[in-house]
Image: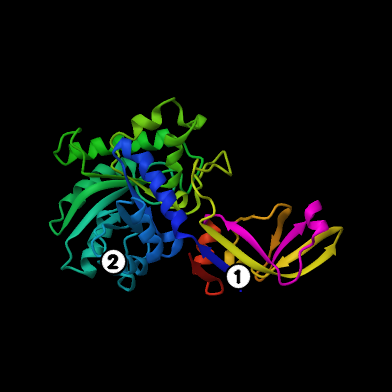
């Protein structure tokens, strides 16, 4: 059986590193736990490393986090609209419309909801369109059973290479317009200004992408932001980027999660020494795996098998053997699949 090993000390290290980067900008770090199914041990490592709040998108994960961390602030990133997903254990609910708020209240009319309005700023995923944001905010603010406490957006998440400068500039403009629409004055923003995800760290940690337009924009555009929601960089040390497949946060641990699988067979096939490893798409999805051992290259995956080539001189001199274990570092989508697969054992260290 494949085994996923989770090193909690390395997750805590990565969390602390990011929290320290954000601290001079007065931006708190929110640890996103959905990549590890809201596991309480991972969440505990995030809190120990300096995460000021936790966030997840699944009702079961939210319940688990609340059960283990009754004092922590928890954000529900994808608020439910059906009763089978209803969950009122979060402190803040992310919503994109007046209709969604009414559905939440309909499922539990006794709840007093604190809300963040999610605005779509170019990522192509969730959120109210920019041109409708202030109107929707005013409608939500008029609901007496709920309190609009902030705004949220995603940038460089679904579209990793999207211009960050443009997205944050649009978000800041919408924040000012909403404040004015609510009678607060354009400089009196709502208290929670939440942005995600991990890709935004490239504005603060190194050379900016050409698409971010202007040197120094990273610092100035973060000015009104109160929190950054981060998952992938905490868990894997990687900063998603459209122009670089391997952009890693300097000093972060990339091996907080390792996936080990047994060698099932080794043969010469079509002139290549090929090994089959004992896991496949049913265990790890179709995401990428990074071999930890030099000389091993991924070839293909089927439902039950992962084929690798073993062409290096070292492996020719000391070939892999049946029953031996090969170790890999998962990428984010692979980690999601492995954490949710019942066929992958989990070991916390």
How far apart marks 2 and 1 lie (CA) works out to: 30 Å
Task: Tell me residue 201's x, y (percent).
Answer: 43, 40
| Figure quadrant of residue 79 | bottom left
Which element is circle 2 on?
A: helix
Vertical placement of residue 234 versus 90, above or below: above
**Which residue lies under the disc numbered 1?**
2
| Residue 264 horizontal/vertical position (percent) | 73, 71
Dot 2 corresponds to which residue? Answer: 66
Residue 125 shows in the view: no
Residue drawn at 42 percent across, 43 percent down:
155
Instruction: Provide the secondary structure element on which disc 1 rests.
Output: loop
Which class describes the residues within 10 Å of circle 2: few (<14), some (14-19), or many (20+)? some
Residue 185, picture quadrant: top left
Residue drawn 24% across the image and 69% down it: 107
Ranked by sequence position, the earlier of labels 2 and 1 is 1
Q: Nearer the viewer, residue 184 or 227?
A: 227
């Amino acid at each position: 059986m494949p085994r996923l090993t989770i090193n909690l000390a390395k997750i805590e290290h990565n969390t602390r590193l990011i929290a320290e980067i954000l601290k001079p900008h007065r931006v708190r770090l929110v640890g996103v736990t959905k990549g590890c199914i809201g596991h309480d041990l991972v969440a505990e490592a995030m809190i120990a490393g300096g995460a000021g709040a936790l966030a997840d998108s699944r009702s079961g994960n939210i319940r688990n986090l609340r059960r283990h961390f009754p004092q922590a602030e928890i954000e529900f990133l994808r608020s439910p609209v059906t009763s089978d997903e209803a969950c009122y254990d979060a402190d803040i609910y992310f919503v994109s419309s007046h209709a969604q708020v009414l559905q939440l209240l309909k499922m539990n009319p006794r709840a007093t909801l604190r809300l963040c309005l999610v605005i779509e700023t170019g990522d192509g995923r969730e959120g109210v369109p920019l041109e409708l944001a202030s109107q929707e905010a005013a409608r939500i603010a008029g609901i007496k059973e709920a309190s609009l406490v902030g705004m949220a957006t995603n940038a460089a998440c679904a579209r990793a290479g999207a211009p960050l400068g443009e997205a944050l500039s649009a978000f800041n403009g919408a924040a000012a317009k909403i404040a004015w629409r609510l009678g607060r004055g354009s400089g009196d923003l709502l208290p929670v200004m939440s942005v995600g995800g991990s890709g935004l760290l490239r504005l603060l940690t190194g050379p900016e992408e050409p698409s971010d337009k202007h040197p120094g924009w990273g610092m100035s555009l973060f000015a009104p932001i109160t929190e950054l929601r981060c998952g992938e960089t905490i868990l894997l040390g990687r900063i998603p980027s459209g122009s670089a497949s391997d952009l890693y946060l300097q000093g972060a641990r990339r091996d907080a999660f390792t996936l080990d699988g047994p060698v099932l067979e080794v043969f010469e096939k079509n002139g290549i020494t090929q090994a089959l490893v004992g896991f496949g798409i049913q265990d790890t999805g179709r995401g990428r795996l990074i071999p930890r051992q030099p000389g091993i290259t991924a070839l293909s995956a089927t439902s039950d098998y992962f084929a690798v080539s073993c062409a290096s001189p070292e492996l020719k001199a000391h070939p892999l053997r049946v029953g031996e274990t090969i170790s890999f570092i998962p990428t984010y989508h692979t980690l999601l699949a492995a954490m949710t697969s019942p066929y992958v054992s989990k070991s916390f260290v």
